[in-house]
Image (spheres, helix red, strand yellow):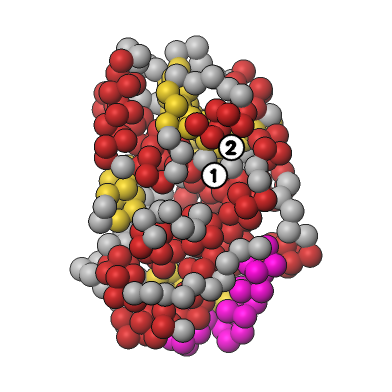
Amino acid sequence: MTIRHSGGSYEVHFGTLSEAFLGLPLDRRVVTDDNVAAALGVEADLVLPPGETTKSLEAYADAARALARTRAGRRTTLVALGGGVVGDMVGFLAASYMRGVPFIQIPTTLLAMVDSSVGGKVGIDLPEGKNLLGAFHPPVAVYVPLDALDTLPDRQIANGMAEVWKTGFIRDADLVSRLESDRSPNRELIERCVAHKAAVVEADEYETNGIRATLNFGHTIGHAIERFQNYEGFLHGEAIAVGMVLESRLGERLGITEKGTTERVAACLDGQGLPTFWDVPDADALIDAMRMDKKAEAGRLAFSLLDGVGSCRLWTDVPEKDVREVLKG
């Protein structure tokens, strides 16, 4: 599958982990985390601690210095072997090390396969918010090792399926209907999600016309929850699942989203074993975090809201009072 961007294009290959390694250049540095190294039994040039806290300025500096000590040069290709955190960190390293080096994505989690490995957005977190330091730096190739799915626990599968459901909710009602009868991930499902992501990215690579922002359905609230929990509670997909339910409810409250959509969204996610409710302990803290969301302008709250299942649009300057009422339940 070919993904086009302003600087050219790259291929997404579907196969096995061993096939992915056969496609790597000789001058490379493989970066992974402790969990992936143990689960897949691979050797890497740089092994990071697992978890969202790896996407900190401090961890970035440590990784950059470790990379420099390997004498990586401008023609060295960085290889992100892991989930979304590894992909984001390695991508940002590639965008900034020596003012930019090539990198390859080998996503080993379902979530990374269907979403974060494609599109070229890379970044790290600040205490003030998620992905506030970042760049648009597309990979030169993506290798999807489908056999890595066999190493994932059920919770990680459900975590990735949250983004699969999101894809259906925002632009593919037929996909939602298919998932309601068969929730298992397979190659056809992953390819379908990647194709949707590619179409969105090609239409709005640099997030200038609101199309790419629709991929953030559930993420305004979801990211705020993650930050509130200091990235130690829900997994990313779990937080996004709660966010999708709450943002569907917000859309219905505002008269934007078709009535009954929230009930269907919640039933779909609940059937996947994902959380659909969170007792919000501090609405003010969550709203403050939402003001740091990249879609927000001048502190005004912005959300990607469904018209109904299969259609989504970006809405800016959403009234705070309505957001607060939804958070209060």
Q: What range of the chain is rendered magenta?
A: 251-272
Neighbor class of circle 1 (other Cα within 10 Å; few <14, some 14-19, many 20+) is many
Residue 232 lies in the magenta stretch: no
Decide if residue 142 is on the left or right side of residue 29: right
Seen in the picture, residue 49 relative to 191 is either above or below; the reply is above
Which residue was labeled with disc 1?
A: 112
Residue 187 image point, x, y percent: 72, 43
Residue 253 lies in the magenta stretch: yes
- Identify which residue, 236 or 166, lies in the foreground: 236
Residue at point 26%, 73% (across, down)? 300
Q: Report the residue that reaches farthest toward the left.
A: 298
SS at mark 1 in the image: helix
Mark 2 belongs to which amino acid? Thr
Residue at point 34%, 74% (across, down)? 282
Which residue was labeled with disc 2?
A: 108
Residue 155 image point, x, y percent: 62, 52
Residue at point 52%, 40% (across, down)? 83
Q: Report the residue that reaches farthest toward the right.
A: 181
Mark 1 belongs to which amino acid? Ala
